């Protein structure tokens, strides 16, 4: 038995619903302010759905259903997704491979630049005749080109695994 909802939160003027599983003691629900415990909105459950879209006041809340208890806390606000957006962007920052991660931004995950090489060797089977896309074809593609590894610049990139 649970009250399921977007634990991250809701924008004030967007749809807001929770899904109730189990058998409530009554077909009602309440939006309760945290931490005061004041009831700020009440509604009727419709087919196990608590629709509180009409409630638009910003703050921290939980849904209470008689006989089932309360939901996890959630936030209603204009910038409720900002922490997730920031975390995603920081994830990209942590995965950069050609730059050091400064301690003031990366905290305990600071490190020096990885993959400092500026040249990469490409195996001949990956760069031989017919393997280059038309936009990258060189002036010649003869046997001597295939006999030695191709070389090119390779700075930057993203980490895809440990190390």
Image: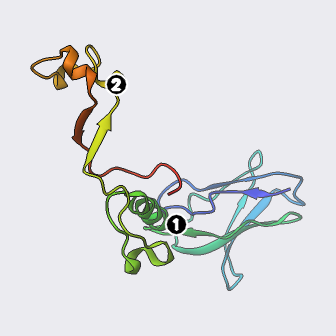
Q: Residue at x 72, y 82 (%)?
A: 37
**Farthest-out residue, bottom:** 36
Question: Is 52 rendered above or below residue 34?
Answer: above
Q: Residue at x 28, y 19 (%)?
A: 128
Q: Which mark is residue 37?
A: none
Q: Residue at x 23, y 36 (%)?
A: 151
Residue for badge 1: 56
Alpha carbon distance from label 2 to label 1 = 58 Å
Q: Residues within 10 Å of mark 1 (few under 14, many from 20)?
A: some
For residue 91, side relative to residue 140 (left or right): right
In which quadrant will I find the N terminus? bottom right
Disc with the residue nearer the chain's start (2 vs 1):
1
Residue for badge 2: 126
Q: Residue 116: tell me if it is visible.
A: yes
Q: Does dot 2 land on a helix, a strand or a loop? A: helix
Quarter occupied by residue 10? bottom right
């Amino acid at each position: 038995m649970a009250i399921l909802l977007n634990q991250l939160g809701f924008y004030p003027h967007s749809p807001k619903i929770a899904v109730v599983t189990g058998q409530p003691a009554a077909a009602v629900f309440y939006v309760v302010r945290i931490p005061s415990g004041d009831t700020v909105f009440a509604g009727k459950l419709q087919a196990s759905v608590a629709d509180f879209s009409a409630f638009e006041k910003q703050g921290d809340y939980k849904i209470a259903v008689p006989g089932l208890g309360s939901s996890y806390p959630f936030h209603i606000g204009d910038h409720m997704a900002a922490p997730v957006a920031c975390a995603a962007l920081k994830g990209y920052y942590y995965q950069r491979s050609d730059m050091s991660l400064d301690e003031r931004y990366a905290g305990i995950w600071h490190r020096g630049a990885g993959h400092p090489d500026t040249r990469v060797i490409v195996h001949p089977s990956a760069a031989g005749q017919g393997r280059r896309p038309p936009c990258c074809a060189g002036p010649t593609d003869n046997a001597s080109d295939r006999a030695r590894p191709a070389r090119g610049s390779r700075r930057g990139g993203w980490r895809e695994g440990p190390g």
